[in-house]
Image (cartoon, rainbow, N blue to C red):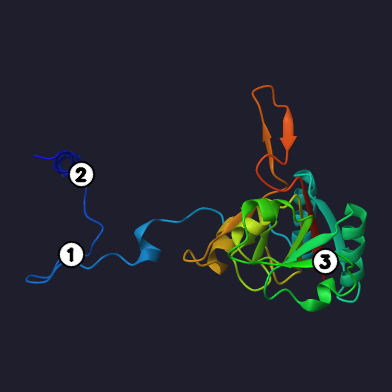
Amino acid sequence: MSGRERILGRIRRALADVPGDGTAPVPGRPAEPTPYERAVPRAYLREHGERGTTETVDLLARNLADYRALVHRAGEDELPGLIARLLDERGARTVLAPDGLPPRWLSAAGAARVPDLAASTPHELDAVDSVVTGCAVAVAETGTLVLDGGPGQGRRRITLVPDHHICVVRVPSQVVASVPQALERLSPTRPLTWISGPSATSDIELDRVEGVHGPRTLEVVLLG
């Protein structure tokens, strides 16, 4: 008997008295699996408290700031100038612009554009001063941005290597209150990146160090 067979045998014995999750079998036909939405009870709260749209966006801004992200608000007409100013303040000479990023967002920026290429090496990405992306959804209760590689978001690594990330969130359309609401908008088949503040870690003494495995500076623009 192989190790695999022994392990599977132990699992079968441990589950011998556990009811299956299928429907009652019809003679001559295999049991049908329980539909996904009924397989696991989900009686938990979908969000904590009741908030209107403005309150939800304000909560997102507060939680982003609590994670030490720098939060800005802008209208469509103000966005190009704001992004140009943020890049200038950073002293950025190069900015990575993923495919699908609205060209107008960087229309006022003087930094040289760097494309999002599959062939780019980690060393080349580390040399990029800044990256500007959109997002798929933002979670107010956790202050989390989620990118799924869609248009204007690019490959996962472009937001994990460069030291400065500017992320634009359209409000209120891309803002949800809770993680369960965010999951409803996301596909598990896409490359999801969940970002809660700039990259940071703490040692046993709780000394916080930023930029260990990602951007040291995260700037979020709430575009309304």
Tag 2–tag 3 contact (CB < 8 Å): no
Q: Is residue 207 above or below residue 189?
A: above
Amino acid type at mark 1: Ala
Q: The N terminus is located in which quarter?
A: top left
Q: Residues within 10 Å of mark 2 (few under 14, many from 20)?
A: few
Disc 2 marks which amino acid?
A: Leu
Q: Which mark is residue 15?
A: 2
Residue at the far top in the pictured view: 205
Specify whether residue 143 is in view: no
Q: Amino acid at mark 3?
A: Ala
Q: Quadrant of residue 182?
A: bottom right
Q: Residue at x 75, y 56 (%)?
A: 128
Query: In this figure, which residue is indicated by the disc labeled 3?
Result: 112
Task: Describe the element under mark 1 as helix, strand or loop.
Answer: loop
- In this rendering, does residue 138 appear at all? yes
- Nearest to viewer (mark 2 / mark 3): 3
Q: Are marks 3 and 1 in contact (CB under 8 Å)?
A: no
**Label 1 vs 2, first from the N-terminus:** 2
Left or right: 7 in relation to 76:
left
Q: Which mark is residue 24?
A: 1
**Label 2 to label 3: alpha-carbon separation:** 60 Å
Point 66% across, 67% down: residue? 116
